[in-house]
Image (cartoon, grey):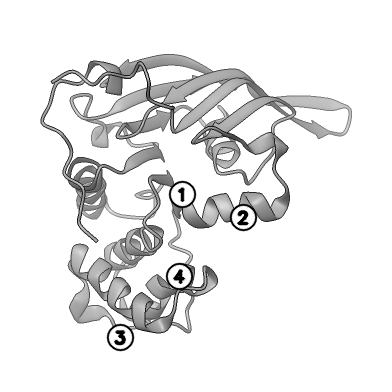
Amino acid sequence: MTTNMENEVPLIKLENVVRKYYVGSSTIHALDGVNLTVYPGEFVVIMGPSGSGKSTLLNVIAGLEKPTSGKVYIKGQDLTKLSDDELADIRRHLLGFIFQFFNLHPSLTALENVELPMLIAGVPKKQRTPRAMELLKLVHLEERANHYPHELSGGEKQRVGIARALANDPPLILGDEPTGDLDSATGKEIIDYLIKLNREQGKTLVIVTHDESFVDPTVMRLLRMEDGQIMEDIGVKTENIEATPTIRSEK
């Protein structure tokens, strides 16, 4: 079944995005006229050498950095026109972030770390605790729910990070080198979880990675960056996928 994109609003749309940094008298073009459209259900992997603009692109999509010029839309909303509070609301409800170094709160259990985004969003405890446990079950960590980060392996910490990113059920998941601090076997396990989220729950993923061995062009769309520009865009794109419809989890 070919997806009809004609009337679908892109989840992400960047129009001629430029991001400059000024270091003394020098100007660094971290992003140099980037145009990008990502539709719901895509799994996008961003690769490129150090300094190519990968993480800056991810931060601009997340609203963590504002472009020097150009437009950034998330689900049709122009991030460049939103206040800090409005941007925080977008990050709270429309996207989840998976970090390379986990960023778990050391004094909170795995369960409490997953609950944290829901606590910030004002979700009552009677709702957020069962939801957090459901997510830990999704990543096969329900038996580690009451363990603290220092009691977890690297792979377990990252799986808690994935569960936390899903806490508020965002349609978009961003990851900045989510396997970068893991051994290859554990890294593959994390990528497999991300593919499962994409295939079974219909989550849109945009992941920065340095490890080409994890890229599967049969299920992913690969962007290669260099000098702040997208130089190559290959692999599966939503508009030409022929596959069974994604299965979204029931709430």
Residue 182 at x, y percent in the picture: 32, 55
Q: Residues within 10 Å of mark 2 (few under 14, many from 20)?
A: some
Residue at image coords 38%, 16%: 233
Mark 4 vs 3: CB contact within 8 A: no
Q: Is residue 45 above or below residue 148?
A: above
Whichever of labels 2 and 1 marks the residue nearer the N terminus, that label is 2
Whichever of labels 2 and 3 marks the residue nearer the N terminus, that label is 2
* Label 2 sits on residue: 88
Residue 190 at x, y percent in the picture: 25, 52
Q: Tell me the distance, in whole angstroms, between the alpha carbons under discs 4 and 2.
A: 14 Å
Q: Quadrant of residue 113?
A: bottom left
* Label 3 sits on residue: 146
Whichever of labels 4 and 2 marks the residue nearer the N terminus, that label is 2
Q: Which of marks 2 and 3 is in front?
A: 2
Secondary element type, mark 4: helix
Q: Residue type at mark 4: give it.
A: Met
Q: Tell me the distance, in whole angstroms, between the alpha carbons under discs 2 and 1.
A: 10 Å
Residue at image coords 46%, 49%: 95
Residue at image coords 59%, 20%: 15
Q: In which quarter of the image is residue 244?
A: top left
Q: Residue type at mark 1: give it.
A: Leu
Whichever of labels 3 and 1 marks the residue nearer the N terminus, that label is 1
Q: Can residue 117 be seen in this view?
A: yes
Residue 78 at x, y percent in the picture: 62, 33
Residue at image coords 40%, 52%: 170
* Label 1 sits on residue: 95
Q: Residue type at mark 2: give it.
A: Ala
Which residue occupies the extreme front position in the image? 7
Residue 143 at x, y percent in the picture: 18, 80
Whichever of labels 1 and 4 marks the residue nearer the N terminus, that label is 1
* Label 4 sits on residue: 118
Q: Which of marks 4 and 3 is in front?
A: 4
